[in-house]
Image: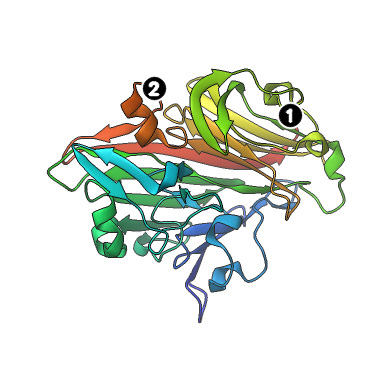
Amino acid sequence: MKTEGMSTVIIRDPKSGSTASIAVDCGFNCFRFVARLSSGESVDVIAAAEGFENGSLPASHNGIPILFPFTNRIRDGRFSWDGQTYYLPPSLVPYDNTGNAIHGFCSDVPWRIVAQQEDSVTGEFQLSVDAPDRLPLWPTDAVIQIQYTVTGSALRTRITVRNPSSKPLPWGFGTHPYFRVPLSAKSDPAKCTVLVPVSKVWELEEFLPTGRIVDPPQGEALDDAPFFDSLKVDAVYTKVRLKDGVSVCQIMDQEAGIQVEQKSSSDFRDIVVFTPPWMSAICMEPYTCVTDAINLQQKGIDAGLQILSPGGTWTGFIDIEAGPVVC
């Protein structure tokens, strides 16, 4: 259903009662997911400020921002491609406070709904249609579709990227989910653990990769499942360990007896982990490429930049599911 007076769609699994709320005009951002467990307990999984869906709060600070056709940052908002130099001006795209373009072209603009049922909704963003002022800033036009479905205690996201142009499309995709910690109002965040199946990090200088891959700093080895309160991190992790072809990130709230897992398809080769200082949450952000990939790749660094041929299509998935702690 659509909420009256606002560009918000609420989808619901009629069997479990789980719901998800999507701010269509705020980058098709799923800013709330309430998972209903088989025990009857509800888990409010995603963190967003009250009133975010009204459009008055930062798109990148709430819910699940969608990052496309680039993830994270582009150094100085500049890159070259196929003999042409591109500049992404701060008057047209989001910037960080150090002078870099950030978070892609579609996290802060309205999308279009192309399909909807009680338990699912599909949104589409096409650069030439939904942000035509940004079209000259990228080598080609680009289309992305996101389908959200609630089923049981899971939010399933299916992603499709298409190249509608006659030239190769360079691109990257990621999400920026804010997961609540703890998972119950009765729990202590200090007793929650975080597990991310990664063994290395990209060395960063002022949030931008140097091209070197190194060991995580002391206390930031996330494959050891550290306690949440010990983490103050903003890093790009890599060397993702897959289980049956899927990466599995986890938040475990032992006190509540609840865990949340995020499962991503194998093309998500990097994971940004960020503990925001303005809320009790953690971001575990699956990316198909590293920050500033379009510049790094052309320096001979394997940054994961994707190239989609004319008329080509890519698909991937990210599933978020709540349930009882599994020992």
Three-letter residue code for mark 1 = Val
Say which label, 2 or 1, has the lower sequence index: 2
Q: Is residue 71 visible?
A: no
Residue 316 vs residue 296, the one in the foreground: 296
Residue 119 appears left or right of 324: left
Q: Is residue 56 above or below residue 229?
A: below
Q: Which residue is mark 1?
A: 326
Q: Residues within 10 Å of mark 2 (few under 14, many from 20)?
A: few
Name the residue at 42% across, 61% down: 117
Residue 176 vs residue 249, the one in the foreground: 176
Three-letter residue code for mark 2 = Asp
**For discs 2 and 1, the disc positioned in front in the rendered view:** 2
Occupied quadrant, residue 267:
top left
Q: Residues within 10 Å of mark 1 (few under 14, many from 20)?
A: few
* Residue 119 percent coordinates (x, y): 48, 57
Occupied quadrant, residue 56:
bottom right
Q: At numbered mark 1, what does the secondary structure look like: helix, strand or loop?
A: loop
* Marks 2/1: CA–CA distance: 36 Å
* Residue 245 percent coordinates (x, y): 47, 21
Q: Is residue 171 above or below residue 129?
A: above
Residue 286 vs residue 208, the one in the foreground: 208
Residue 29 appears left or right of 92: right
Residue 300 appears left or right of 210: left
Occupied quadrant, residue 238:
top right
Name the residue at 53% across, 71% down: 55
Most extreme residue toward the left, as rendered? 166
